[in-house]
Amino acid sequence: MRTAAASPAAAEAAYYQAVEEFFVSRRGDPLLLSNADWLLIREWRTAGLPLRVVLRGIADALDAHAHSWSRDRKVGSLRYCAAEVEAAKDRWERALALGADAPVDAAQLLAVLAEELEAARDLGPEGSEMAVRLAGEIRERAGREGPPREVETWLASREAPFLAVLRRETGAEGLARVEAEVDSGLEPYRQRMPERVLSQIRADAVARRLLEAHGLRRLSLFHD
C-alpha cells in the first residue's frame, strides 16, 4: 500500500508544472506558456511519456538552439522542442524494446499490480470480485511477451471498467466529495491552463483518488 505525499490534483498537475518550470528556466527569462503549449504537454502526458524523457528532449532542443545561427533569438514556444521530444521518445521506446533503460521491468510491475489488487481494501462486492478477476488477468498477461506500449494500452482497457465499478460503489455523495477535493486542488491552475488540460488533470486526479482510497495505484507502466 502506498500513501500519496500530495493531493491527487497536485500530483497530476506536478507533471505539467515541472515541464513549464524546466522550459522557462532553460529558456532564460520568464515566459507564460500559451494554450497551445499546455495542450502539447497534455499530449505528452496522455501518451504516457515519462517526465525525464520530455525534459531530455527539451534540453536537447535548447542546447541545439544555443549553438545555432539563430541563438540570439529567443525560443518563443514550447512547440520548438517538439521534434527533439519525439526523438527522445523514440530512443526511449527502442531502449524499452531492448530491455534497457527501463524504470522497472514490465513483468515485475504487472506482478506488483496484481498483488495490490488482491490486497485492495474496502471494496464492495462487485469491486472485490472484479479486482480478483483483474489480478488473474494481469498475472496471465505478465507471462506473455509484448511491447510496453501494447501492455500499456491493454492496462488502460482494463482500468476503465474497474474505475466505473469504483464510482458506482463510492456512490454519488462520496464521488461528489472526491471531485470537490480535486477541484479545490486545481484552483491555483485555473487561470493558467486551458480547459481541456484542466479536464484531463481532473479526470486523472479523480481516478488516482478513487484507486488510492483502496490502496491501489493507476494501472499503468508509466504513470505513478
Image (cartoon, rainbow, N blue to C red):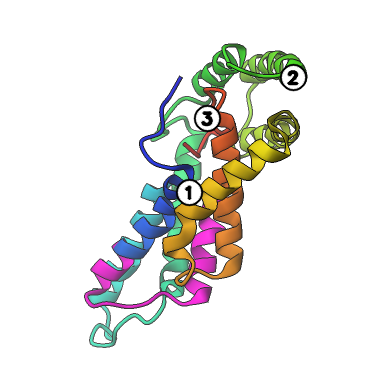
Is residue 67 shown to the viewer in this render?
no
Please say whether residue 39 is one of the residues in the magenta stretch: yes
Q: Residue at x 56, y 33 (%)?
A: 218
Going by the image, does 151 lie left or right of 9?
Answer: right
Residue 143 location in percent, x, y? 63, 15
Instruction: Work out whether 196 lies above or below 170.
Output: below
Q: Residue at x 51, y 18 (%)?
A: 112
SS for dot 2: helix
Q: Residue at x 27, y 73 (%)?
A: 27
Q: CA distance from mark 2 to mark 1?
A: 26 Å
Q: Earlier in the sequence, mark 3 or mark 1?
A: 1
* Amino acid type for the residue under numbered disc 2: Met
Magenta segment, prevailing SS (helix, strand or loop) = helix
Q: Which range of residues does the magenta coloring cover? A: 22-47
Residue 180 location in percent, x, y? 56, 49
Q: Quadrant of residue 129?
A: top right
Residue 196 location in percent, x, y? 61, 65
Q: How many marks?
A: 3
Numbered circle sitting on residue 9: 1
SS for dot 3: helix
Q: Residue at x 29, y 75 (%)?
A: 65
* Amino acid type for the residue under numbered disc 1: Ala
Q: Earlier in the sequence, mark 2 or mark 3?
A: 2
Numbered circle sitting on residue 130: 2
- Nearest the viewer among 66 and 74 is 74
The residue carrying pointer 3 sits among few (fewer than 14), some (14 to 19) or many (20 or more) residues within 10 Å by Cα, namely some
Q: Earlier in the sequence, mark 2 or mark 1?
A: 1
Front label number (2 vs 1): 1
